[in-house]
Image (tube, grey):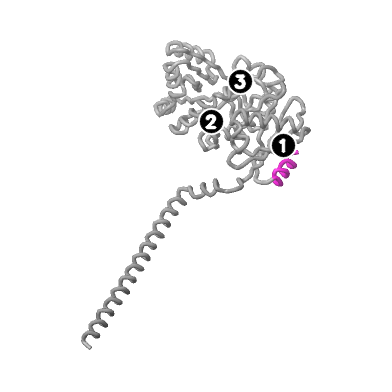
């Protein structure tokens, strides 16, 4: 029912426990980094959770973004590509490029999420990605993430949520995410749009 | 006789005028009262429609409505209830300050170290904030923990029933 588009378990023990917790929490699919796919996909498939290969690309400018996106799609045609941009040009490129499936938003690029971004993403078929591990790394990130959630709600931007969990205690239960959205935008169930598979 | 008649006529006229003035004054007061009632009724309807009256009445309530959050604590080693309550209070203080501790009226009602199920009481306005605070609890005394919210209920009786169903 729910999908966590990025997890990166550090070892087999964490992967096994994560699979059990995610299954009980209602997750039906997870995204595993390509480098960990062969090693840990079996742990999740045993629990009946579908596993998707995911590749993360990073870029500081548009030229680099173009190069890494082309390279990633040619090498991994069936993977979900998450783009992390350090500049506005790279962010806009990832947004309009149909090869990139998810564009991760950071504190630097949060103000670029607006009505134009919504139009660009709907044309390219991509989505904005919210990495929930940033909240666990530093709770002060709650501030700009609340701003991001309000922008997503106001401009109807397609989005997805993922935990980027490396250990079993870093996963997020859907009810926790609903409480976050309830605090941010006053409408908790909006979070389900970001957890929906597909 | 003529003088008496004149005086009586003048007095009668004065009485009629006085009565008329009294009647007019009363009518004006009644009309004003009527206008005031109409305006206050209009204002009350507008406020009611906007929900402001409800919010005001809720704020002005002496006792806020309680909510019981049922959670399950997954941990690498068993935790005593006193440690769990201290941890939750510290997390709420870190996120929302001393004001948060006071306003949330937080209290750990029940916790079973064996099953990991617990119930924490708070007010209706603070239930989502408390779930966010519980979500950010990921380690305690160096060991990994995860707090999963199960349900939110309005009574402790229903909370106990739900825990019984789960265990």
Eye-nearest disc, 2 or 1: 1
Q: Are marks 1 and 3 on the same chain?
A: no
Number of marks in picture = 3
Q: Earlier in the sequence, mark 3 or mark 2?
A: 3
Residue A174 seen anywhere in this rendered image of the structure: no
Q: Residue at x 53, y 25 (%)?
A: A130
Q: Which residue is mark 2?
A: A194
- Identify which residue is drawn at 31% across, 70% down: B21
> Are discs 2 and 1 both within one chain?
no
Identify the chain of the residue marked 2, using the numbered disc in the image. Answer: A
Cα distance, mark 1 to mark 3? 33 Å
Residue that badge 1 annotates? B118
Query: Toward which corner of the image does residue A174 lie, by quadrant?
Result: top right
Q: Label 3 marks which chain's residue?
A: A
| Residue located beneath label 3 in the image | A32
Q: Is residue B164 magenta?
A: yes
Is disc 2 placed on a helix, strand or loop?
helix
Q: Position of residue B127 (x, y in %)?
A: 61, 38
């Amino acid at each position: 029912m729910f999908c966590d588009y990025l997890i990166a378990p550090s070892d087999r023990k964490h992967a096994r426990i994560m699979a059990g917790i995610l299954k009980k929490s209602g997750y039906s699919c997870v995204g595993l980094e390509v480098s960990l796919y062969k090693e840990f996909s079996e742990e999740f498939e045993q629990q009946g959770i579908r596993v998707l290969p995911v590749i993360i690309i990073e870029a500081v400018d548009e030229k680099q973004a173009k190069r890494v996106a082309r390279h990633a799609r040619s090498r991994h045609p069936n993977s979900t590509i998450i783009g992390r941009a350090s500049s506005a040009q790279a962010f806009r490129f990832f947004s309009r490029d149909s090869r990139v499936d998810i564009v991760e938003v950071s504190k630097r690029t949060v103000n670029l999420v607006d009505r134009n971004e919504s139009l660009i993403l709907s044309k390219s078929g991509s989505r904005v990605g919210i990495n929930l591990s940033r909240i666990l790394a530093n709770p002060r990130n709650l501030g700009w993430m609340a701003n991001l959630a309000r922008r997503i709600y106001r401009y109807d931007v397609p989005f997805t949520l993922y935990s980027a969990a490396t250990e079993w205690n870093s996963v997020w239960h859907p009810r926790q995410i609903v409480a976050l959205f309830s605090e941010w935008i006053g409408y908790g169930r909006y979070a389900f749009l970001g957890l929906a598979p597909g | 006789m003529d003088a008496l008649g004149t005086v009586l006529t003048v007095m009668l006229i004065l009485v009629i005028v006085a009565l008329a003035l009294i009647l007019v004054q009363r009518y004006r007061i009644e009309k004003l009262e009527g206008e005031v009632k109409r305006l206050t009724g209009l204002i009350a309807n507008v406020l009611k429609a906007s929900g402001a009256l409800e919010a005001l009445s809720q704020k002005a309530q002496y006792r806020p409505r309680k909510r019981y959050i049922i959670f399950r604590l997954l941990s690498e080693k068993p935790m005593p209830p006193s440690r769990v309550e201290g941890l939750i209070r510290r997390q709420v203080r870190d996120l929302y300050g001393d004001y948060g501790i006071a306003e949330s009226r937080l209290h750990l009602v029940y916790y079973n170290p064996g099953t990991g199920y617990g119930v924490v009481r708070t007010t209706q306005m603070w239930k989502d904030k408390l779930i966010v605070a519980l979500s950010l609890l990921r380690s305690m005394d160096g060991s990994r923990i995860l707090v999963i919210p199960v349900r939110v209920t309005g009574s402790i009786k229903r909370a106990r029933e739900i825990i019984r169903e789960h265990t």
